[in-house]
């Protein structure tokens, strides 16, 4: 469906100019993994269980599984986001850096309370977010029963990473302003559902 009366055949020239399709699945996933690890923090979007509204909050990446496509985040199992996921498991995780590179991972999520998995990826930093309730049990330590793991299983992903230096990007943008041609500044990539399934079958 078109929302414009553009006379040209291609109404989204930026996407056409930057879309990077001549790359292997291995390379696409490796570059996404490297970017996600470098960002560390992502915005987790769920659907509010009560209102149905989309809600986002910042989360720290704890680990990756299945060759990097599945993401793990620690959570307080008493928090609202666990209620959201119990109501609707569909989720999106987005990452952004200061250069404007970004990634969007869509999938389904589950809350895992297995103590071995929690302890495997536990960080003392979690104490700052859970607090110590002073009962000798809920102390923010690795045995605190409130600590669980949100496992996000990727369905699809889209991302854009820079293919030029900052100076090169600025030159491309300046040229685009003058000439009207789209700036070629990113490697815009997509990982489809079938590609994710292909990756899972070998990892």
Image (cartoon, rainbow, N blue to C red):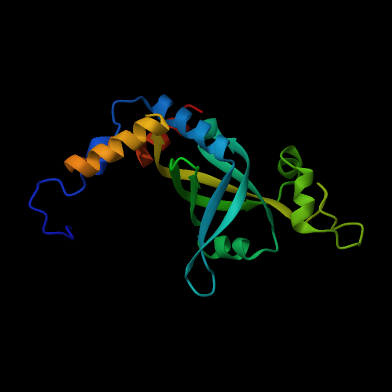
Where is residue 127 drawn, in percent x and y? 79, 52
- The answer to whether residue 153 shows anywhere in this view is yes
Residue 158 versus residue 144 in the image, above or below: above
Where is residue 190 drawn, in percent x and y? 35, 38
- Residue located farthest toward the bottom when viewing the structure as drawn: 51
Residue 109 versus residue 55 in the image, above or below: above
The quadrant of the rendering that contains the N terminus is: bottom left
When asked about the image quadrant of residue 178, the answer is top left
Residue 40 versus residue 113 in the image, above or below: above
When asked about the image quadrant of residue 28, the answer is top left
- Residue located farthest toward the left when viewing the structure as drawn: 7
Q: Residue at x 77, y 54 (%)?
A: 128
Which one is in front, 133 or 151? 133
Q: Residue at x 36, y 24 (%)?
A: 24
Where is residue 136 drawn, in percent x and y? 92, 57
Residue 156 in the figure: left or right of residue 36 = left
Q: Residue at x 73, y 44 (%)?
A: 118
Residue 83 in the figure: left or right of residue 130 = left
Residue 169 in the figure: left or right of residue 102 = left
Which one is in front, 53 or 86? 53
When asked about the image quadrant of residue 78, the answer is bottom right
- The answer to whether residue 186 shows anywhere in this view is no
Which one is in front, 116 or 144? 144
Q: State how many labels appear.
A: 0
Q: Residue at x 35, y 37 (%)?
A: 170
Residue 126 in the figure: left or right of residue 15 = right
């Amino acid at each position: 469906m078109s929302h414009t009366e553009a006379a040209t055949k291609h109404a989204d020239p930026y996407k056409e100019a930057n879309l990077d399709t001549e790359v292997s699945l291995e390379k696409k996933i490796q570059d996404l993994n490297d970017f996600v690890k470098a960002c560390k923090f992502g915005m987790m979007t769920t659907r509010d269980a009560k209102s149905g509204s989309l809600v986002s909050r910042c989360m720290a990446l704890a680990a990756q599984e299945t060759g990097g496509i599945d993401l793990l985040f620690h959570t307080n199992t008493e928090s609202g986001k666990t209620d959201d996921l119990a109501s609707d498991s569909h989720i999106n995780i987005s990452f952004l850096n200061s250069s404007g590179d970004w990634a969007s991972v869509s999938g389904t999520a589950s809350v895992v309370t297995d103590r071995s998995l929690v302890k495997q990826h536990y960080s003392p930093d979690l104490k700052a977010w859970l607090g110590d309730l002073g009962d000798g049990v809920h102390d923010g330590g690795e045995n605190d029963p409130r600590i669980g793991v949100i496992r996000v299983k990727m369905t699809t992903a889209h991302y854009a990473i820079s293919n030029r230096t900052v100076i090169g990007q600025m030159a491309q943008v300046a040229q685009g302003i003058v000439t009207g041609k789209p700036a070629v500044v990113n490697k815009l990539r997509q990982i489809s559902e079938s590609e994710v399934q292909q990756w899972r079958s070998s990892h």
